[in-house]
Amino acid sequence: MGQFAIGVDVGGTNTVSGIVDAKGNIHEKLHFDTKDYPIFETYIDRLARDIDSLIRHTTGAELAGIGIGAPNANYLSGLLEDPINIEWYTCNADGSRGNRMHIIPFVETVRRHYPAIPVVIDNDANAAAIGEMIYGGARGMKDFIEITLGTGLGGGIVANGEMVYGHGGTAAELGHIIVKSGGRQCNCGRRGCLETYVSATGMVRTMLEILATDNRPSSLRSLRINEITSKMIADAAEAGDELACMAFEETGRILGEALANFAAFSFPEAIFLFGGPIKSGNLLWEPTKRHMETNMLRSCKGKVKLLPSGIDNDNAAILGASALVWKELHKRGNVCK
């Protein structure tokens, strides 16, 4: 196997870790329920058990480091800052749950278990961008943007072959660009953020607004409001449902206009789209690309490729996390074996 990395994806539901070699092959994966460990110290102890187990599977190979992808993670500080959908607490002297933690020293705590092993963390969208650069469609590119679509929208910007972190380490919060003044309430506390319109949950909100204002028939009218999902909207649109097609057109319009704006500030070679809504194929892709090109700055027109992610969706989180290790090795001038 030569050198290998351990990639850890910290999610609100599951924590998944795996062994990844320098070519992107995953040799072993383990997971556990994140919410089963609300006390942060016990969570890290549980994670360390999985990491120890993975290390035992790599007899004779060299562990290059541990890469961690997590929501609201700061690459520069190693901290998680009010992670979305995860609540961790301090541990009282008697072992009971203490106060909720808002600033979590994730890297520092992991390093106590592995003091001789490099540990690096980044937010999940940045990790996806680095994974795209090392394992996916952005190999050989020095300027690109990664957009991750799911329940929210994440962004990672690579310029001159380097991630853009900004002064405080949390740059590229592209999902929180305001696209409609005074618009939909976002979990970040602001109104009108891009992710409230083009994420999977944003598309559902658009569909509900269309159903409330357009009297034309739709197969989705037979469902309860809280039952409708983006997958159901896609299925209805594929079957020719006019209102469902309207939801995709509107989502693609807003996303395409935003991508044209993103191209204006970094002029990337390509913009990669990754995540569940992209699985709807041309339903979202066609209007997004059309509106992106229509609104593109003249100097960028026809020069920015819109591409699907080249990373396997099922393993993207692990690959992205492990890619952080190879990026760090390259930065230090080390050579992967």
Image: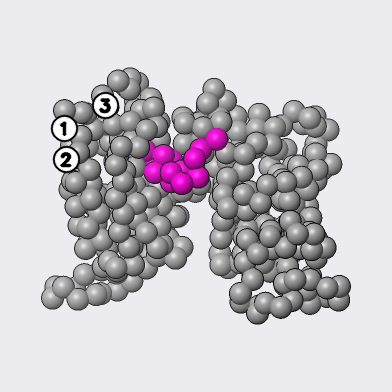
Circles 1 and 2 in contact, beta carbons < 8 Å: yes
Mark 3 is on which residue type? Met
Mark 2 is on which residue type? Arg
Mark 3–mark 2 distance (CA, rounded to whole Å): 13 Å
Q: Residue 59 has which mark?
A: 1
Q: Residue 262: horizontal and vertical position, in percent?
A: 68, 42
Q: Quadrant of residue 204?
A: bottom right
Frontmost residue, 210 versus 234? 234
Task: Indicate the colouring scheme.
Answer: one colour
Q: Earlier in the sequence, mark 3 or mark 2?
A: 3
* Quarter placement of the N terminus: top left
Under circle 3, the secondary element is loop
Q: Quadrant of residue 33?
A: bottom left
Q: Residue 298 has which mark?
A: none
* Quarter placement of the C terminus: top left
Magenta region, residue range: 310-322
Query: Which residue is tagged 2?
Result: 56
Q: Name, please, the residue furthest toward the front.
A: 239
Residue 182 lies in the magenta-colored region: no
The residue that appears at 64% across and 71% down in the rendered structure is: 228
Q: Earlier in the sequence, mark 1 or mark 3?
A: 3
Query: Which residue is tagged 3?
Result: 1
Give the crowd class for mark 3: few <14, some 14-19, many >=20 residues within 10 Å.
some
- Can the viewer see residue 22 in this picture? yes
Mark 1–mark 2 distance (CA, rounded to whole Å): 6 Å
Residue 321 lies in the magenta-colored region: yes
Mark 1 is on which residue type? Thr
Q: Residue 72: horizontal and vertical position, in percent?
A: 45, 55
Frontmost residue, 220 versus 144? 220
